[in-house]
Structure formats: C-alpha cells, structure tokens
Amino acid sequence: MPDAKPQLYRDLAVQLGALLDGESDPIANAANMVALIWHGLPELNWAGFYFRRGSELVLGPFHGKPACLRILVGQGVCGTAAARGSAVLVPDVHEFPGHIACDPDSRSELVVPLVEDGAVLGVLDLDSPVPDRFDDADRAGSEELVALFVAHHRRLAPTDAEDIDPASGCRLPLPRREDLDEESLRIYDRLADPDGGTLRGLRGPGGIQLHSPELSRRSRPVNHYLRYESGLGGRVRELAILATAREHDSRFEWAAHEPAARAEGISPEIIDTIRWRGATVGLAEPDAIVLDLAREIFAARQVSSQTYARALEQFGERRLVDLVALMGNYAATAALLTAFDMQLDREQPPPLPRLFFPGR
Ligand code: SME
C-alpha cells in the first residue's frame, strides 16, 4: 500500500478545507486543525502549533501533554525549523542536538513552518513515541495542510481589485485640483510637492482626507502639532507611530514610517520587536514604555496602573496626553487607510507579517 499515506493526507486536506470554510478566527481554526490531525494520523503523542512572537515561538492550540510555553527561534527542533524556514524531520530525537523534551515519550518529530511572504509566522509540530515515525510523505502531506491553513488566513495581497483606482492606489480617486477652494488648494499643492513635508503626498492619507476639505484643514495642524511641536521628539514619535501601525495591522502606515524610524536612529532590532510584537523587557525605559502603552491601549484595551505610572513618570502630564493623542491620530489614519484600502507600492514587499496570537 505505497499510496496509503499520500491518500490519507489528501483526505485530511479535504476535511481541513471543510473545517476552515467560513471561519476566519485563526485560533479556532488552529484548534480544529490539530484535532483533525490528532484523530487522523496514527502514532502521535503530541500535535500542535507554536506561533511566532518577537524572537520566540509561543505555544498555540495542541493535543498531548502540557508543553513548553516558549521556544527561542533557533532552538530545539521547532526553533530550528522556524530559523530555517523549512521542515525539519527528526527520526530519533535523542540524536538531535538541542532537542527540547517536552514529553519524554517523544522519539521522533516533524516540524513544518508556517511561511507567508518569506516570513515564518509559526510552526506545526508533530511528535511520535515511535522512532522513525515520519517520512517524506508525512513531510509533504503536513506541508500541504499547513499551506492550506496559511492560505486560508492570508490577507488580500496588493491587488488588482476592481475597486482600486490605479492613479490613487486606493478606493477613492485622487482629489482633483479643480474641485478645491483656495484654502484646500494650498493643502493640495503641498501634498503634490515632493518637498512639501508629507511622507506620501497625494497617494496617501493626505489625499484621502482632501476628499473632505474641511476635515483636511482642521486635522493637518493637529497632526503637525503632535508630530513636531509637542516636544515628544523624533524617536518617541516614530516609536509611537510604528507601534500604532502594528497594533492596527496597517501595512501602508508601517511602510511609510519604517524609514522615518530608521532615520531617527531606531535600531533594526527594536523595529523588529515592534513588527513581531516581541517582549519589551531589556529595552531602554523610554522606548519600552511607548511600546507597552500602545499595546495596552490598542490590544489589551486597558492600561494598567503600573504602565500608567511609568508613562507619567517618563513624560509628565502634558506630554503624556500628547503622546496618547499622537497614537490616536495615527489610529485614525490607519482606519482611513484600511477603509479606503490604500495599496502598498507594487514593488514593496509586505512589511508587516500576520500575527496569529491574539491580544498583546
Ligand atoms: N521537541 C520540541 C519542543 C516542543 S514539544 O515537542 C511539544 C523541540 O525540540 O523544539
């Protein structure tokens, strides 16, 4: 029966498709996928997900004994598969240097990474009490199941969607100069001027806002004050904007501001901590508090007394109000970018990976 295994995986893929159909919650879907695998594949003692967060993999839905909560990317079989971005098949876990023994019954292991746009978002880990349990058919079959899972949750890639105007890159047309009164014309001309001081010109949130000239007139000075006159400084400003973009999954906002963050001297490591919502432990306090505050406001939807006290100590009352208002200002921008579906530039690789774990 040489074809039995591929056929088994083909059947599982059909069942997985049916389970995923119509459900968008990745945790619910991951839980059902693991249940399907657990009951569909023989000789497993552990099957489950780890999802990437910062430089760690964090335990997701699984079946089997309680397991390690966090695994560093690069460590163990899971971390190795995540670091390589390709499946790791271990016939005998005792022969794999650095294997992390969550369940002493495990004798062989197969780990398949979840890859989207070149980024590893997590891994599917299968353990067996039987040595040499997994072969290439298991690897191929599991990769197929994982690919289905990733594809199901994929956000729409930069598209040729019918409602996107190619000139504006979003659902609204570019604002037309001849429709504008004198005051709005000044805003238009600043936006159209490559040296006008905006990051994206008319093909960005400024162009969207100009469809409501009164909004544009009123909001631009507020944005300018929060960014440049409130005394927060460039580093805090760009940390706050990136953290806000991350928490709103605003790829366009992120892409516009990552270069600005680098220009303010924010290191690639810190930018990656924000991108992957990694731990802020070990960052300098002024940086850590900006990230913690943004995550609590937008993800936890509650700011703890400790975080509030740290933020107050760091910024004082007036600047803290301005900092939170700056985050709110960029949350509003992210809402506009999402509603009008502002597209990344075609050549721009997606800068923000999808995060599967909920909350902060
Ligand atoms: N053995 C894994 C750790 C995860 S448990 O098997 C659930 C590893 O070495 O990465």
Image: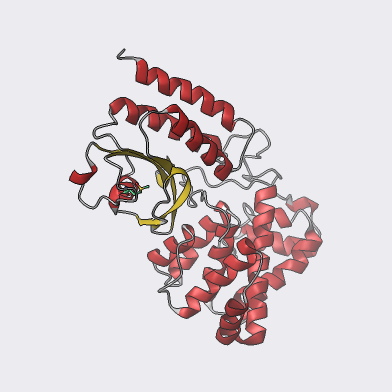
Q: How far across and how far down the image is residue 136, in percent?
A: 28, 27
Asked if residue 288 can be seen in this view, the reply is: yes
Q: How far across and how far down the image is residue 100, in percent?
A: 29, 52
Q: How far across and how far down the image is residue 233, in percent?
A: 54, 79
Q: Tell me if residue 262 comes above or below residue 205 in the rendering.
A: below
Image-based side of 12 in relation to 109, left or right: right
Q: How far across and how far down the image is residue 281, in percent?
A: 43, 72
Q: Nearer the viewer, residue 288 or 159?
A: 288
Picture quadrant where residue 232 is located: bottom right
Q: Tell me if residue 97 comes above or below residue 111 in the rendering.
A: below
In which quadrant is the C terminus drawn?
A: bottom right
The residue under the point 39% across, 32% down is 143
Q: Nearer the viewer, residue 193 or 97?
A: 97
Image-based side of 62 in relation to 200, left or right: left
In which quadrant is the N terminus drawn?
A: top left
Q: Tell me if residue 169 comes above or below residue 72 in the rendering.
A: above
The residue under the point 66% across, 33% down is 162
Asked if residue 235 can be seen in this view, the reply is: no
Q: How is the image coloured?
A: secondary structure
Q: Tell me if residue 293 comes above or below residue 123 in the rendering.
A: below
Image-based side of 124 in relation to 97, left or right: right
